[in-house]
Amino acid sequence: MPAGTRPFRQFVIKVHSRCDLACDHCYVYMHADQSWRGRPVTMSEEVLRLTAGRIAEHAAAHGLPRVHVVLHGGEPLLAGRERLRGFARELRAALDGESTLDLRMQTNGLRLDDEFCAMLADEGIVTGVSLDGDRNSNDRHRIRADGSGSFDGAVRAVRKLGESAYQRAFGGLLCTVDVENDPVAVYKALVELDPPGIDFLLPHATWDRPPSRPYGGTDYADWLIAVHNQWTADGKPVRIRMFESITRLANGGVSLTEALGLGSSDLLVVETDGAIEQADWLKTVAHGAPETGFHVARDSFDAAAAHPGVEAQRQGLDGLSAQCRACPVVAVCGGGLYGHRFRTGPQGSGDFDNPSVYCADLLKLIRHVERADDSRPAHGLRPAHFDELAAGYGGTAALQELEQAQHSLRRVLLAAAHRADPEPSEGWQAVLALSGAAVEAALADPYLRVWALAVCEGKGADPGRPAEIALSAAARSGGRLSLTVPLRDKTVQLPLLGRLVVSEPRGEVTVSVESGRLLFAGRPLDALPEGLVWQPLRHLVADGIRVALDDLDPYRAPYQVEARPRLTDAEFQEWQTAFEAAWRIVRAGFPRYAEGLAAGLRAVTPLVAPSGHVVAETSRHAFGAFGMALPPSAEALALLLIHEFQHVKLGALQDMYDLLSPGGGRHLVAWRPDPRPLDAVLQGTYAHLAVADVWATRAEQALREADRDEAVRLADYWLDAVRSALDTLSAAGAPTAVGERLLAGLRTTARALGRARP
C-alpha cells in the first residue's frame, strides 16, 4: 500500500451497460461521453470476480470495517436475477472476514416481480427506484424507445418492493428535478408511495451545457423550496436526503450526499469491461472524462487513487474556487457536485476551478432551509460555533453548547448506571427524584461520567455515591434533602463541595440539606461535633475565572498518573499564586484561548510528578477538567492551561461528531516516540497548533533577542509538526465530511500563523 493513500469506501459496479428506457436526461447515453457503445453489454463473471478481489484487497490494506457497493448500469436488472444473485454472493464471499458489505442497487424497476424482489431481500440488496413524480412528470423524460411512458411499470415495482415480504430491500426513490413539473404534485406523488426516503437530483449540467431555466432565475432553488415548504408543512413524513444534508451540515454534521459538503470523494466506478473509472457523472463533461487508464485485471484501487483527476476531487476546501472559499455557506454547499463546476477555457481546455453551475440555486436553497428549519439538534453546534472550534479557539457561547451536550451525555450515563447498579438504594431514589436546577447541578460535576462508567462496567461497588450526588445537587440548588450515607474510607465526599472526614468508628452518617445549607449528624459546618471534620473544595481564583483545585473527589483521576492527596494550605497557596500569574499571561497575551478557558474549565486535579518532569493529562470522560503537576514557572503553567484545554474541547467534539472514519492504522508524530492511532494524531494536532500559536505570540512579544530566537525556533518546530500531521490525517482517508471541515479550519489557522511569523 503506497504511503498516505486515501482509501475508497464506495464502489459502483456497472453490471450492465444497456437500458430498456430511453430517458432524454440520462447522463450515460445522452451526454458528452459515449464510451458505452464500446463496452460489453454485461459484466462477465470473471470481471466481477476480479472486481470483488480488488475491493477485498483494498478493504484489507486500509482496515475498512465496511464498504459500500452499488450495482448499476445502464439498467442492472437486465443482467438477470440469477446473475445478480451470483454477483452478490461473490462480493460477500470476497469480503468475508475483512469487511461488512453494504450492497445496493439503482434501477428503473420495470423488470421487478415477486421472484426478483425475493432475491433482493434474500441477498440483502437494498434497491432504489428512479421515479420522477406523478404520471405527467415522470413520463416527460422517463420513456421507452417507442415513446411510451414508464410510470405504470415503475409504480408497480415500488408497490411490490413496499410489500412486507420485500420491504427490507426497498431503499427509496430517486427523482431528477424538472422545473417545468409541478413541485408539490411531484412531491405528493412520491410520498403517496410511502418510500423510506427520497433523493432529489439536480440534472447533470456544466457551464458549457447549462441547465434549462425557463423562468430565467433561480428556478431549481425555487422548485426545491416549494417542495421543502410542503414537506415541512406535512410534518416531514419521509426522509429527503438533500434537505437533511443541508440541516446536518449547517449544524456541523455529515452530509448524506456527495453533492453537498466538503467531504472528499471516496468513490470509484468499475465498468462492464473492468475499466476503473472516476464518478460516472463526469460523462457530462467530455468524452472519456471519467477514464483513469486502470483496469481491475492489472491495477489496484490504490493505483487509481494517485490519478490526477481523483486527487483533484480530494482537496476539500483547498480545491474550491476563490469565489467558493469566500462564500458564507461553503461548509454546507461544498462547491456543489464536482462535475457541475466544469467550464471550457479560452484555449479549449477545461477546468473545475469554478463555482457550481447551480451556485445561485444552492445559495438560495441553503439559506431558506437554514432559516426555515427549526429541527436543529438540541446539542448540534451552531455553524459559527463549530467553525470557531475548528480554528482552534471557541468563545463562551461555543463552550456553553459543548457543555450542554456533555450534560446530556452524563444524564444518559447516569440512567445507565442506575440500571447497572446491583444495589438500588435510598440514594438512587433521591437521584431519580431530582428536578429542575438540582438536575443541572448534578450534571455539572466533571467527574460524574467517570463514576457512571465505572458502575456500568462493574468496576467496584460504591454504595454511597448516589446519595452523595443527590445531596450535593440539593445543596448547590438550594433544595432540601436528608439521607444516611455509607462511609467510604471514613469519608463522605460531596461533588463540587467538599469532603467530610469521620475519625470516630461508624459505618454511616446522616447528611441533611436545609435550603441549601449542609448539616452533618444534625449539626451545621461551623458546629460539627468532635470526630467530624469538613474539608471544603478549594478554588483557584483570578480575574474573570474560578476553577476548583480538586484534591478530594475519589473519581478525580481517570489519568495514568496518580492524583495527589489533599494539599496543605501552603501547597494550595503555591498553586494559587502560580495560577494568578499564569492567568495574567493567558488573558493578556492569548485572549482567544482565555475566553474559552474562563467559560469551560471547571476543575484541575493536582497530579504526582517525578522530579523535573512536566506532567499534564486529560480524559475524554472528564469534560471541563484535567490533571497536572504544578510546573516550575507561570509561563509554563500558562502554556499547559491552553494546551490541555485544547484536548478537552476536541474530546467534546469527538463525543458529538464522527470526525474520523474507523481504521487508518498508526502513524508517527513529532510529539510522541511511538506510532499513534489516527484519533490520537488528531488530538495532538489540535493541541499542538495552540502550542505553535503560543510560541509565535511569544516570539512577537520577546524583548531579548535570545528569547525571540528560541520562541521562533519552537514556533517553527511545532507549526511544521502540525502541518505534517494534518497531511497525515488527510492522506490516511480518515476525515468524515465534518472532520474535513474541522481540518480545513485548522489548516486556515496554521496558514495564518505561518504568514504572521516574525
Image (cartoon, rainbow, N blue to C red):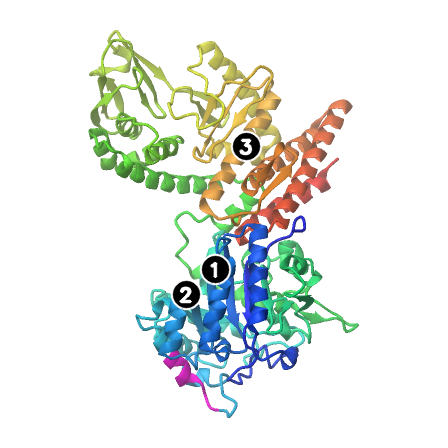
Cα separation between marks 1 and 3: 47 Å
Q: Which label belongs to residue 124?
A: 2
In percent of width and height, residue 409 lies at 38, 41
Q: Amino acid at mark 2?
A: Gly
Residue occupying image coordinates x 57% and y 78%: 17
Numbered circles on residues, count: 3
Q: Nearer the viewer, mark 1 or mark 3?
A: 1
Q: Is residue 741 left or right of residue 134?
A: right
Q: Amino acid at mark 1?
A: Leu
Q: Amino acid at mark 3?
A: Ala
Q: Is residue 505 left or right of residue 257?
A: left
The answer to whether the residues at label 1 and label 2 have Cβ atoms under 8 Å apart is yes
Q: Which label belongs to residue 101?
A: 1
- Residues 76 and 469: in front is 76
Cα separation between marks 2 and 3: 53 Å
Cα separation between marks 1 and 2: 9 Å
Q: Residue at the bottom extreme?
A: 146
Give the labeled residue for mark 3. Answer: 594
**Label 1 vs 2, first from the N-terminus:** 1
What's the magenta region?
148-157
- Residues 576 and 155: in front is 155
Q: Residue at the right extreme?
A: 347
Residue occupying image coordinates x 39% and y 79%: 157
Classify residue 611 by image quadrant.
Answer: top right
SS class, disc 1: strand
**Label 1 vs 3, first from the N-terminus:** 1
Is residue 712 shown in magenta? no
In percent of width and height, residue 743 lies at 59, 47
Residue occupying image coordinates x 49% and y 48%: 658
**Label 2 vs 3, first from the N-terminus:** 2
